[in-house]
């Protein structure tokens, strides 16, 4: 989403086995063609077999490209950074695979756009490949 639309990272994400969702701030909703391209791009990254690793660093050692905007005010001074090959780096407390190939196939099942909040909600599934 960040690379394709130039938007911020997801406002929130809810990842579950059966169905997951993410919300993004966008000035206009993506076209159906863009939604299909997004799905393909995500699957291309997944199939790249990128290693997923993490490290703990102090806040003052966090690289400038890592967005800490969603951290609560009372977050620890030590943060966990999750690196996905050379594709992405973010602060995260969630559970992660060891390699992107473990994720499976990404499939967008529905999406909608709220024109008042400029929020695009994406619902998706991950299926074993």
Image (spheres, grey):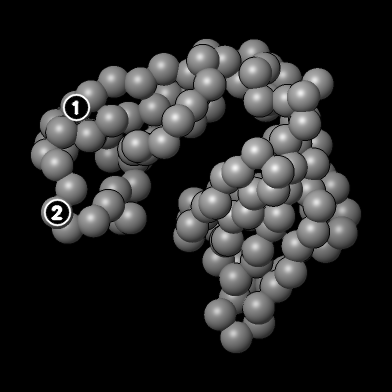
Q: Residue at x 22, y 34 (%)?
A: 79
Which residue is nearer to you in this view: 100 or 62? 100
Quarter of the rendering containing residue 120: bottom right
Q: Would you place residue 97 above or below residue 10 in this image?
A: above
Front-lying residue, 104 or 19: 19
Q: Are marks 2 and 1 in contact (CB under 8 Å)?
A: no
2, above or below 82, in the image? below
Q: In the rendered structure, which disc, 2 or 1, sits on the residue that comes first in sequence?
A: 1
Percent x, y of residue 11: 48, 60
Residue under the point 59% across and 55% down: 22
Q: For numbered disc 2, what is the local secondary structure?
A: loop
Q: Is residue 15 above or below residue 10?
A: above
> Going by the image, does 54 lie left or right of 101?
left
- Separation (CA) of disc 2 from disc 1: 16 Å
Q: Could you say where residue 40 lies in the image, as x and y percent from the top left?
A: 80, 36
Position of residue 65 in the picture relative to residue 122 (left or right): left
Label 1 packing within 10 angstroms: few (<14), some (14-19), many (20+) = some
Q: Quadrant of residue 7?
A: bottom right
- Is 66 placed left or right of 28 in the picture? left
Which residue is depicted at the point 70% across and 43% down?
Answer: 18
- Residue 92, position as x, y percentages in the image: 37, 38
State the image coordinates of residue 34 (x, y, percent, origin top left). 80, 53
Residue beneath disc 1: 57
Q: Nearer the viewer, mark 2 or mark 1?
A: 2
Identify the image quadrant of residue 26. bottom right
Answer yes or no: is residue 39 visible: no
- Secondary structure at numbered mark 1: strand
Residue 27 in view here: yes
* Tag 2 residue: 74
Is the C terminus in the top left, top right, bottom left or bottom right quadrant? top right
């Amino acid at each position: 989403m960040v690379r394709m639309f130039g938007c911020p990272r997801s406002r929130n994400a809810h990842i579950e086995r059966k169905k997951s969702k993410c919300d993004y701030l966008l000035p206009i909703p993506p076209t159906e063609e863009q939604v299909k391209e997004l799905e393909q791009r995500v699957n291309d990254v997944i199939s790249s077999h990128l290693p997923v690793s993490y490290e703990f660093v102090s806040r003052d050692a966090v690289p400038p490209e890592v967005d800490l905007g969603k951290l609560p005010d009372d977050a620890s001074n030590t943060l966990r950074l999750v690196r996905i090959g050379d594709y992405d780096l973010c602060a995260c407390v969630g559970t992660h695979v060891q390699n992107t190939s473990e994720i499976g196939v990404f499939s967008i099942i529905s999406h909608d756009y709220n024109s008042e909040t400029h929020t695009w909600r994406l619902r998706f599934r991950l299926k074993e490949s």
